[in-house]
Amino acid sequence: DITKVWPDGYDEIVGLAAHNGLLIIFGQHSIVVYQGAQSPATMSLADTVAGVGCVDRDTIQHTGTDVLFLSYSGLRSFGRTIQEKSMPVRTLSNTITKDIITELQNESDFFRSVYSPEENFYLLSFVGRANTYCFDLRGPLQDGSLRVTKWPASVFTAYERLDDGTLYVGSDQGISTYSGYQDNGESFRFRYYSPSLTFGDASRLKFIKKIKPTIIGSSNADAFIKYSYDFSESYRSVTFRIPSAGTAAEYNVAEFNIAEFSGEPQQIIRKALNATGNGSTVVVGVESDINGSELSLQEINILALVGKTL
């Protein structure tokens, strides 16, 4: 009788998952975990989690070492327990918590998700909002959250991964596969923008002298380096051309932030671009059109002078 074990007294079952011999029962606002779940005769209550539940059954994905699910505060994961008696819960979407909450508050249709071990991503689609979030599972950031890319205006309504690794994507246009470096035969715009940078002291002026991006891949494409000061939405822009590289490599190169691997030599582009102006905070961004060639932004180095306090 599950009503006797909910930590908050009452909840509704949203979904189920099996992990390391445990049966995980997701409620809307809490979670119950049973051990010995290989047989009903040996099942016993192992743990409960109050205040954290699952939004929808179709957001639950088993990765082999984790169970990912969407809660009302963001994407979460059950970490693999080795020495701890209770199962820890990690938040994986710390960098976009506000965005996820906004999506949840305005979602009118349904959710879809899929895990791809070949591409090392977890896709989460808010179908009514026409937004998909791609979480990179290759390695967490320092705070435990995952790198994430937003795919706006996505029309995806269903996913299915076959045993051979083929990932099928469903939409009102039909069924397609996830491959290549185009969006349904068309180019798409890659955009990355940093948070507001203060260089350790928000009260002093910064004079940006050079911006040095490192880009891997792409071919015959224009890259736009944009920057602005003091939260202004009017960006200054510097453009440079990425030359043709013949057969470009695909090691650690992302389409929608997804890596593929190949033994071909890779094209590494490093540029030192002059910048002007000054301000207390700085935002730096990179944009480029992806059309048949991969592109990966590896890093951006900023050379700046910090004004003296008088």
Image: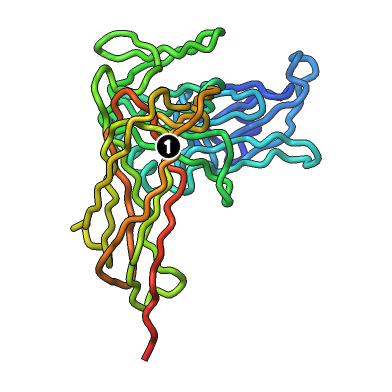
Q: Is residue 51 above or below residue 256?
A: below
Expressed as whole percent of the image width and height from the top left, the position of residue 60 reads 52, 25
Instruction: Tell me which residue sits at (62%, 41%) in the image.
Output: 89
Expressed as whole percent of the image width and height from the top left, the position of residue 103 reads 33, 38
Q: Which amino acid does label 1 sit on?
A: Ser
Expressed as whole percent of the image width and height from the top left, the position of residue 269 reads 41, 42
**Does residue 14 show up?**
no
Q: Please rate how many residues cluster around mark 1, counting C-alpha atoms within 10 Å: few if below 14, some from 14 to 19, many from 20.
A: many
Q: Name the residue under label 1.
A: 296
In the structure shown, which secondary structural element does the residue marked by tag 1 occupy? strand
Instruction: Tell me which residue sits at (33%, 18%) in the image.
Output: 157
Expressed as whole percent of the image width and height from the top left, the position of residue 100 reads 39, 41
- In this picture, residue 109 sits left or right of residue 19: left
- In this picture, residue 145 sits left or right of residue 213: right
**Which quarter shows the C terminus?**
bottom left
Q: In which quarter of the image is residue 86?
A: top right
Instruction: Tell me which residue sits at (73%, 30%) in the image.
Output: 45
- In this picture, residue 298 sits left or right of residue 34: left
Q: In this view, does 243 lie above or below 206?
A: above
Q: Quadrant of residue 63?
A: top right
Instruction: Tell me which residue sits at (33%, 76%) in the image.
Output: 205
